[in-house]
Structures are given as structure tokens and as C-alpha cells.
Image: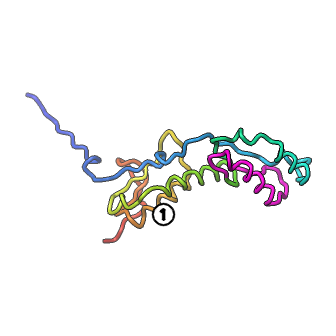
């Protein structure tokens, strides 16, 4: 007697649309420029010395890179110093932001997400994929949630077989 079993893929039939935030991963090398190295005794920015450094430094090394400018020293650095760095890096770098690696990742993801036409998800049941090989900052999940909530029928987090409900439109 032969037993035939028919397996039904309920996930495939559910009508869920899986959106992987890692798909928005911005390409390009990330580097942090720490102004601490430009400070006298890691405390004071000497304007004359700093301007000489800015004038003579090879900024082309930032070509095509995503750069975060920060200061890890406990020092007061005037805004114009960061502005000078950004001014010199901008012609070469792919992106320049003020902040550490977390801020840089946030800005890069937000720029990618801002390019998406979220109307394509109107009235869809969306699952934001929760794990993968590419690290996705929490800020990207927040941004995607903010943009999907007005258009999606429902929004969940995780995998289609195991989701955490985030939002469901009241019809």
C-alpha cells in the first residue's frame, strides 16, 4: 500500500511579502576619521597647526569611501574644524557624515531606503526579515517601519514561518 502525502507550503500561500533590510545595504568601504590625532595633547585644537595639516594632507585616500568624522577624545572641538574636514573630503568620498560608525551606517541605510517607492507595498502583508549575514542597524528597521506603516496592510518582523506582529491596519 502506497501512502502519498501532499505537503502544503502555507507560507507560500499566505500572501506575505518578505522584505530583507539587508537588500538596502549600501556598498563601499567605511572609514572613521578621528580628529583626536589632530589635537595637541589630545585636548586642544591649534588652529594654525590644524589648517596646515588640512592644506597638506592627501585627501584622495578617501576616494569612493564612506567617511564618518568624529572625535574620541574628551575635548571641545569647534564646529568649523569638522566643517574643514568635510570640505576637503567631500570631493573624494562617496559620503561624509559627522559621527561614529553607527551614525555612518544609519545615514547610509536611510539614504538607500529613501530611494524606495513604498507605494509598491500598498495593501501588502509585509514581513521585515530579522536575521541574515549582513548586519542591519536597528535604525534601518525603524525607518522601514515608519515608511511602511502608512501603506502596508500589516507589518511583521522575523521570518514568514515565525513572525512578531508590529502593525495591522484596522479595516
> Is 14 placed left or right of 142 in the picture?
left
Q: Residue 115, position in %: x, y? A: 48, 56
Snapshot quadrant of residue 3:
top left
Please determine whether, in this image, residue 149 is positioned above or below residue 19: below
Number of marks drawn: 1
Q: Relative to 169, does residue 128 appear above or below in the rendering?
A: above
Side of 46 where 25 appears, left or right: left
> Residue 133, position in %: x, y?
50, 39
In the picture, which quadrant includes the N terminus?
top left
Residue drawn at x 88%, y 53% is 45
Q: Residue furthest top?
A: 1
Which residues are the magenta region? Answer: 68-96
Residue at x 52%, y 45% (from the top left corner) = 25
Q: Is 111 situated left or right of 14 in this image?
A: right
Q: Which residue is mark 1?
A: 146
Residue 6 drawn at (x, y percent): 17, 39
Residue at the location (53% across, 47% down)?
136
Quick check: can you spot residue 44?
A: no
Q: Residue furthest left?
A: 1
Residue 71 included in the magenta stretch of the image: yes
- Please, is residue 80 above or below residue 60 in the view? below
Amino acid at each position: 500500500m502506497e501512502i502519498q502525502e501532499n505537503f502544503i507550503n502555507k507560507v507560500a500561500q499566505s500572501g506575505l511579502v518578505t522584505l530583507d533590510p539587508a537588500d538596502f545595504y549600501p556598498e563601499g568601504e567605511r572609514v572613521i576619521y578621528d580628529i583626536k590625532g589632530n589635537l595637541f595633547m589630545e585636548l586642544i585644537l591649534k588652529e594654525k597647526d590644524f589648517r596646515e595639516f588640512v592644506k597638506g594632507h592627501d585627501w584622495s585616500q578617501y576616494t569612493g569611501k564612506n567617511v564618518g568624522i568624529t572625535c574620541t577624545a574628551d575635548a571641545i572641538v569647534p564646529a568649523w574644524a569638522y566643517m574643514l574636514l568635510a570640505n576637503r573630503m567631500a570631493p573624494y568620498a562617496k559620503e561624509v557624515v559627522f559621527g561614529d560608525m553607527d551614525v555612518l551606517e544609519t545615514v547610509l541605510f536611510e539614504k538607500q531606503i529613501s530611494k524606495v517607492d513604498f507605494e509598491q507595498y500598498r495593501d501588502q502583508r509585509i514581513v521585515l526579515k530579522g536575521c541574515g549575514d549582513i548586519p542591519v542597524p536597528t535604525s534601518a528597521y525603524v525607518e522601514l517601519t515608519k515608511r511602511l506603516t502608512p501603506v502596508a496592510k500589516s507589518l511583521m518582523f522575523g521570518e514568514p514561518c515565525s513572525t512578531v506582529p508590529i502593525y495591522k491596519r484596522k479595516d
